[in-house]
Image: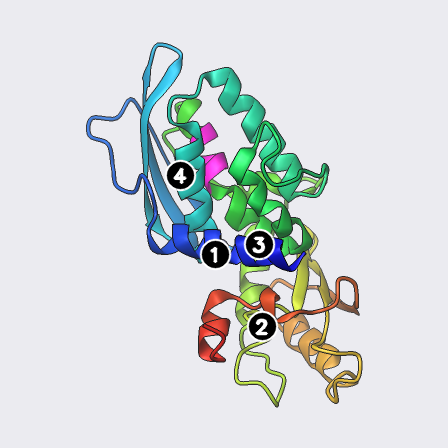
Amino acid sequence: MTDLRDLYQEVILDHSKNPRHSGTLNPAQFSADGHNPLCGDKLHLTLNMEGDRVSDLRFDGSGCAISTASASMMCQALKGATLDEIQSKFSAFHQMVTGEAEFDVGSPPLGKLAIFAGVAKFPVRVKCATLAWHTLRAALDRGEQPISTEGDDDMSAPAQLNTTELESSVVDVLKTCYDPEIPVDIYELGLIYTVKARADGHVDIQMTLTSPACPVAGTLPGEVEAKVRALKNVSSAQVELVWDPPWDKEMMSEAAQVKLGFF
Ligand code: ZN
């Protein structure tokens, strides 16, 4: 397990620092813009086909390490692929990161992309990993409008409020909450497992603490709930404290790890 985690960190960091296939194709037959408001990731994808195969594809943009690495590895995996191969990799990747199916590193049809399996444990990061794939699909559908990862939500009710925007404003508030002993906010620290907003303005949050014996166990969830409830457009909020999976320092964002001196 340790080997796999090391491999995951190594590969993600390598691709986020030195993204392959970055840039813009000009001219491009297909292009689309993608945006993940939950994390702030943005990318522009351009792609050319020769017959049924991808002759080249590039991405440009700014985002977190997971979104950049995912775009870089997706481009690497799809250069030369047919539309059928793209479709089967897309659905396998999506099933893996949403936890619907399990894949081992190197198993077909994902190959190296199976490194992203760990993302399934962190629902707030799933959209970072899928952004490039959704943008690619929009490009192939000849979507000319910027697309959002909102389609990933399991929301069944028709939206009265924009739930993605609401979730994004909740994340902004979570970034102002601190465990008094740690100089990194609770979102970057990886204590937030899920943020789900409903169209009626209700927000559900699952969070953990660095350990069950943590001295702020009694007060922090209540503080978070009060801050979120005070947000415009939030009608009610519920914070659930969970211990599975237990928090681990690898759940911190790369920025938090740098700040706390782990890199
Ligand atoms: Zn991200």
Residue 214: x, y in percent? 74, 85
Q: Who is closer to the viewer here, 160 or 195?
A: 195
Using the image, determine if residue 122 lies above or below residue 127.
below
Q: Residue drawn at (64%, 77%), measured in percent from left and top? A: 227
Q: What label does residue 189 carry, if any?
A: 2
Instruction: Provide the residue designation for mark 1.
Output: 10
Q: Label 2, label 4: how many angstroms apart (C-alpha)? A: 30 Å
Using the image, determine if residue 257 lies above or below residue 8.
below
Q: Are marks 2 and 1 in contact (CB under 8 Å)?
A: no
Mark nearer the viewer, 2 or 4 = 2
Q: Residue drawn at (54%, 22%), measured in percent from left and top? A: 87
Q: Label 2, label 1: how many angstroms apart (C-alpha)? A: 19 Å
Indicate the amino acid at tag 2. Leu
Q: Is residue 256 left or right of residue 62?
A: right
Specify start and end residues of the magenta stretch as a single range.
Answer: 132-137
Q: Residue drawn at (69%, 52%), measured in percent from left and top? A: 198
